[in-house]
Amino acid sequence: MQVTETSAEGLKREFRVVVPADELEEQITSRLGEIGRTIQLRGFRLGKVPMQILRQRFGTSVLGEVLENTLQGTSAEAIRERNLRPALPPKVDIVSFSEGTDLEYKMALEVLPDIPEPRFADLDIERLVVEVPDEDVDRAIERMAEQQRKTEVAEREIPGAGGKDRQILLGSDGFFPGFEEQLTGAVAGEHRTVRVTFPEDYGVPDFAGKDAVFEVDVKEVRQRLPSVIDDELGKAVGLENLAELRDEVRQQMQRDYGVASRLRLKRSLLDKLAQSYDFAVPPGMVELEFDNIWRQHEAEKGRAAQSAAAAAESTLAGGGEAASVETATGETAAALDPAPEGESDEAQTGDLQADVEEDEEGLKADYRRIAERRVRLGLLLAEVGRGNNITVTQDELNQAITREARRHPGYERQVLDFYRQNPEAIANLRAPIFEDKVVDFIVELAKVEERKISPQDLLTLPDPDADGRDASGSEAVGPPPE
């Protein structure tokens, strides 16, 4: 095999590879010999079929098999001999090949960049620490007590509840205007006729704005007893007493705030890493990441367009006037208004189309910057993990699969089978686990300053992803490329 490097530009490499005809013929003959030892043909004893007959019957298929194996083997060998680390599988184009001649092909690939040795000791990060106030725990307990309130049959007239075989809590604003007022004073066994008008924005278009009559038979009137906060409340939710319930509520709130705090710490860390490390990244990896982001954007835009179309159809069907339609790009098209005097509909449409295309190009440029950031951070964190032997254990993967199964009650078996049969799905679970472990490793080395903050202040901070920088999800970080 002869390998010649023909181009080395940035992270791109191109090679010319020539495999001599005699090497190919040796592989073809060897493969035909393997077939001859096992094939049974009429007129020949097992293992005694002449090579000429084998070549006539199986030559074409063996030639294709040898070609494929040779391309894979020689390209991998060329990469290995030059200690290259491909970012993606190499692209191979055959220049010339036929039976009895040399095989010549071109191989193009992108290699992983040399990543500067990470230094985290001087990295300053802020960790927000939330202490749950007693009054927040009290309010949570009160809400639980309200949900556990008991009722008893009322022997007197009170604002009653109506409906068919269901309870209605009056004063909850859960029904149409005027419905509850017409049941005030009802007693068990009473029949009442309730007349209401469906709201204009009612979910079923055929009923929106229409008058309706309900025939209500009151079967029973109950009154709610005062909420009670005592040990029985704790027992009602499976705990020993009220003190244990308070501890459980506090711990759960602390965990929830901890998740929000960690998200902000992680975002701060990734932002600082993105500012501190700037190195070339493989264009092919950026393009793949951009394609993923853009596909998600197009899917979301399609769903938004369907919702807008459905809303417009509902409005027109109800006799209303739709003055404009909001498009997914944020532009507004005057759908029913006539064109301004002197300007044709075609001109309006052309201008709008130009604006939309300009916005789309700007959006693509933004998403490509996002894709490049994500690839660069992914490579950096992958290098940190590789250099420090950070791996995802099978036990951690099993726990992640179990969590996914629990998210789909009644379909646990199907979820488990899905992951068992789909290695790519397992890889999608492995990536965020690896990412979190690397982030934790870096945080341990960095300078972390803790700042106490109230739950209210934490929740009013801007959303760390609100700027759209990570519109398609978390950073694309996975285990180190092989």
Image: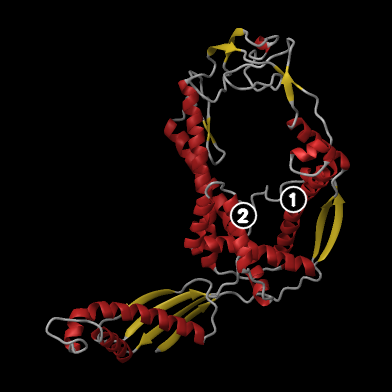
Tag 2 residue: 403
Point out residue 46 in the picture as x, y percentages from the top left corner. 20, 86
Dot 1 alpha-carbon crowd within 10 angstroms: few under 14, some 14 to 19, many 20 or more: some
Q: Residue at x 82, y 36 (%)?
A: 139
Q: Coloring scheme of the render?
A: secondary structure
Image quadrant occupied by the C terminus: bottom right
Q: Quadrant of residue 40?
A: bottom left
Point out residue 385 in the picture as x, y percentages from the top left corner. 66, 72
Give the tally of numbered discs.
2
Q: Which mark is residue 190?
A: none
128 or 401, which lies in front?
A: 401
Secondary structure at numbered mark 1: helix
- Residue type, label 1: Ala
83 or 385, which lies in front?
A: 385
Of tags 1 and 2, the one toward the viewer is: 2
Q: CA distance from mark 1 to mark 2?
A: 20 Å
Horizontal placement of 445 versus 363: left or right? Answer: right
Dot 2 alpha-carbon crowd within 10 angstroms: few under 14, some 14 to 19, many 20 or more: few
Q: Quadrant of residue 432?
A: bottom right
Q: Residue at x 76, y 30 (%)?
A: 146
- Residue type, label 2: Arg
Compare marks 1 and 2 and give the one earlier in the sequence.
Answer: 1
128 or 337, which lies in front?
A: 128
On the question of residue 369 being in view, the answer is: no
Tag 1 residue: 260
